[in-house]
Amino acid sequence: MLGLFIILLLVLFLPFTIKFVEHNLEIFLFVMGLAAAIISGVFNRELLVQALLDPIKITVAVIIAGLLFKWFRRLLENGIRAISNMLPFRLFIALMVIVLGLVSSFITAIIAALVLVLIVSVLTLDKKSEIRLVVIACFSIGLGAALTPIGEPLSTITISKMHEDFYYLLQLVGPYIIPGVVLLGILAAILVKPERGFGLSNEDNIESYDDIFVRGIKIYFFVMGLTLLGAGFEPLINEYIIGLSSHLLYWVNILSAILDNATLAAAEISPAMSPESVKAVLLGLLVSGGMLIPGNIPNIISAGKLNITSKEWAKEGLPIGFSILIVYFIIFLFI
């Protein structure tokens, strides 16, 4: 058990403290997952096959969506410009946040974030408005992408660990996530001001085919590592997490603000958990993941391409995230 604790600490803190690990997170998690599975004695042919198969769907989705985005980028850009000129500003902003959130479960959170960057570049708002828009939209994408196992690694690993079907997450957390995405769209329409300005610097060079396929390979190893990690951590989960109340699990996962939420999902979720506990873990991870840049893939992509600093993100993300957490918690208490 000591070995698993050491691996857990390494997984939680090395990506946050060492740049080399952060930049090679996929391989790092694969190695840590393999080590955890071996130490806990669960590494066998069946687990290896599962780890090889689990990432296929999301990897294919990421590559196909990336290719489509590359091929139709100019058409998409022209369409965004035309629609934004046609619709009232606040209606366009609301629809954009809602649509990106919902379709991210099919086009993947990564591609939704790239589309978001493109939209922000087209709108050319003032910097404060653009940062606020990006943060709110990333909350929406992070939530919406969890509705299917191809949307983001967190949903992929959750479906794998729970041994459930494609629609499991839609049924479990969809009634919470879909209204949340709609409310985020309304919030964006209220808070984002239609003031033109120089906006954010977009370093979004057109991706090469190599970029697209390398990203797919990275996602494959990322999910493969999470599968191994989740299986390896089962003894820890059964010993220390299963017995915790769903309310405590919900708030503990505020750690997802600084740590990748898919990694935490792999370390926490177990088929032995009750549906309420799984729901609490997922919503805690998903909401907290939007509060700071490291918490979720869309944040990292958007902040990197638009040069949003950690301080700028936190200024918008923390109050929005805590507000959403409180609202969901109240719903948990009374429904």
Image (cartoon, helix red, strand yellow):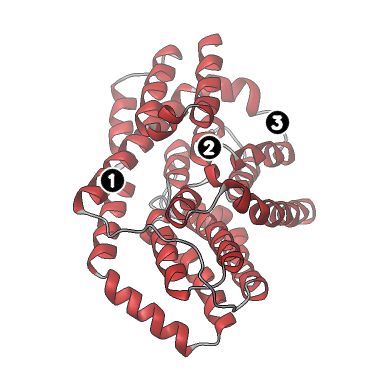
At x 32% / y 19%, what residue is drawn?
A: 44
Q: Left or right: where does residue 298 sit relative to residue 51?
A: right
- Residue 13, image x and y in percent? 55, 26
Is label 2 or label 1 in front? 1
Reading the image, the residue beneath label 2 is 265
Reading the image, the residue beneath label 1 is 216
User: In whole angstroms, how far apart are the C-alphas of marks 1 and 3?
Assistant: 36 Å
Quarter-of-image position of residue 167: bottom left
At x 54% / y 74%, what residue is drawn?
A: 197
- Residue 85, image x and y in percent? 46, 87
**Is 240 situated above or below 215?**
above
- Residue 303, image x and y in percent? 49, 52
Reading the image, the residue beneath label 3 is 244
SS for callout 2: helix
Q: Amino acid at mark 1?
A: Gly
Instruction: Give whichever of 6, 177 is nearer the camera.
Output: 6
Residue farthest along the front direction in this orientation: 198
SS for callout 3: loop
Instruction: Kindly check if marks 1 and 3 are in contact, taking CB atoms under 8 A apart as contact.
Output: no
- Residue 281, image x and y in percent? 62, 41
